[in-house]
Image (cartoon, helix red, strand yellow):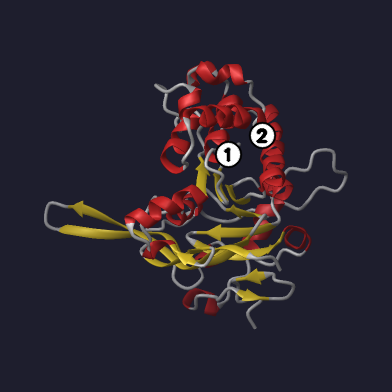
Amino acid sequence: MGEKLLQVENLRKWFTIEGDTWFAKNQSVVKAVDDISFYINKGETLGLVGESGCGKSTAGRVILQLLEATEGEILLEGENLAALSTRQLKNKRKDMQIVFQDPYASLNPRLKVRKIIEEPMTIHLKLSKEERMEKVKQILHDVGLNEAYMDRYPHEFSGGQRQRIGIARALAVQPKLIIMDEPVSALDVSVQAQVLNLIQDLQAKYGLTYLFITHNLSVVKHISNRIAVMYLGRIVEIANRDHFFEDTKHPYSKALISAIPEPGSKHRRERIILKGDLPSPVNPPSGCHFHTRCPFVMERCITEVPDLVDVGESHFVACHLHNE
């Protein structure tokens, strides 16, 4: 087992929603992230997957302290980010960056590429203007863009090129952890593979650690060392990539894998169709959140929350079928 860079312990993020009716005020709580724990070793990629609305992007933002956690600890190299002062957190931010899903919305349309990449260096690194310019040129080269693009604006680029600029901005301060929040889902299919290969090449060159958030298991299979599956704010399974696909444990994970298309395969995988819709995080089911859609539901699933337990070879699953 490698050295842990990030440890998340019992993390919760709940949002309070105020509502008014003609006769009274009422409050609802959205349990976006509901008691999750995991770790990421230095230099590895953990793929965090699940349906839209399961809380995976919220988890990423809480880890980066873009949102304040309701409960739990976030340890980066053993240091609890939630306990840091504003000044200490500012100094720590250069160690963790994010690449957003939408390359159109995540770049300031009023800034040239040069300024977009240089700005984080100005805040976090003590470099001269000439050193910053040389670093901008080097990073553009690393992400496959010509240095002549420095004086262009974001609207002058394609979606794939803009995402490369977003990746370049994240690299500017030499971070240890990068959270990739659906970095290829908004791109054309023809461009996705290029960007994924770039992400892997940069990891090998700079020794980066990734939390790769996506709903696409095919992408996760290509890029991740380990995989964590989220359902309605909770992690239901974590395993090594190969072990996960060869010996999937949780019924929800099995349903996700059955939905992966297999072009050209002679043996078509049996499709598992889940009944019903994803429940609301405002009023989640009791016990195991998945019990309303699970084909193997038991009486205890309705009342007891399953623990995330190791079933062998660092394969963790939260399911009463495997908790005996």
Residues at circles 2 and 1 in contact by the CB criterion of under 8 Å: yes
How many residues crowd around disc 2 within 10 Å: few (fewer than 14), some, or many (20 or more)? many
Question: Percent from the top left, x then y, of residue 297?
Answer: 58, 71
Q: Quick one: label 1, few (<14), some, or many (20+) residues within 10 Å?
A: many
* 258 left or right, relative to 119: right
Furthest residue to the right? 266
Residue that appears at 49% across and 74% down: 302
x and y percentages locating residue 295 in the rendered image? 62, 65
Q: Amino acid at mark 1?
A: Pro
Q: Amino acid at mark 2?
A: Val
The residue lying at 69 percent from left, 69 percent from top is: 315
The residue at 59%/47% (across/down) is: 215
Q: Is any atom of residue 244 visible in this view? A: yes
In the image, taking residue 117 as reference, residue 243 lies left or right, namely right
Q: Pick the quarter of the image with the N terminus.
A: bottom right
Q: Please name the residue that numbered disc 1 is placed on.
A: 183
